[in-house]
Amino acid sequence: MNVPSQMTIGSLEKVVPEDETKKNSDLDMEQFLYIISNAMSMPSLEGGSGGGGGETDYIGQMVQFGMLDSMQELTKTMQTTMLMTQQQQALGMVGKEVSLKTEEDQLVKGVVEKVKFDSGYATIQVNGKTYSLNNIVEVGAASD
């Protein structure tokens, strides 16, 4: 998942760039309908009523295209929701004691001092060192 570097907490506008550039492989519903209408208006070589296929074929293709477009939008929404949930979880850990497993398989314990955001992803700082939320193995109340 690509998260823009200007991502700030709670800002949905920054997750979806204002003017996305389309790739050559991107096709929206309007372009799809244009292609289908042109294909339907062309005479077929066999002398039938239209080009490329029957009306049900076109309707089926349109439904499939619409479903694919909807699935892509749902995926983007789920990614945004996941990212914001992860940020909220990290913010809720400030001041709590955590146990972390480092890359070297060492167990580190300490209080979450602060939360940092790296390209929209939350990281926590414990004992002056930054860790990913994936390193956390236990969370508890801070001992005073």
Image (cartoon, helix red, strand yellow):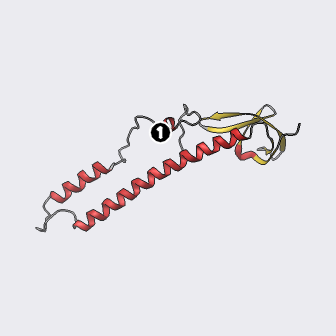
Q: Position of residue 135 (x, y in %)?
A: 74, 45
**Mark 1 closeness class: few <14, some 14–19, many ≥20 residues within 10 Å:** some
**Viewed as shown, does residue 130 lie left or right of 57?**
right
Q: Is residue 12 left or right of residue 67?
A: right
Q: Quadrant of residue 70?
A: bottom left
Q: Residue at x 50, y 48 (%)?
A: 77
In terms of depth relative to the viewer, which is nearer, 119 or 105?
A: 119
Q: Is residue 12 left or right of residue 53?
A: right
Q: Amino acid at mark 1?
A: Val
Placement of the N terminus among the 4 image quadrants: top right
In the figure, 37 relative to 125: above or below? below
> Which residue appears at 74% of the width and 40% of the height?
93
Q: Determine the residue located farthest toward the right in the rendered image.
A: 144
Q: Position of residue 39 (x, y in %)?
A: 20, 57
Indicate left or right for 80 with 143 as reference: left
In which quarter of the view is residue 125 placed?
Answer: top right
Rendering coords of residue 118 (x, y %): 63, 35
Q: How many callouts does the rendering have?
A: 1
Q: Looking at the image, is 40 positioned above or below residue 104?
A: below
Would you name the residue on which mark 1 appears? 16
Depth check: give the residue in front, 35 or 82: 82
- Name the spot of residue 122 as percent of width and height, x first: 66, 39
At 20% from the left and 55% from the top, the residue drawn is: 37
Q: Secondary structure at mark 1?
A: loop
Quarter location, residue 41: bottom left
In the picture, the quarter occupied by the C terminus is: top right
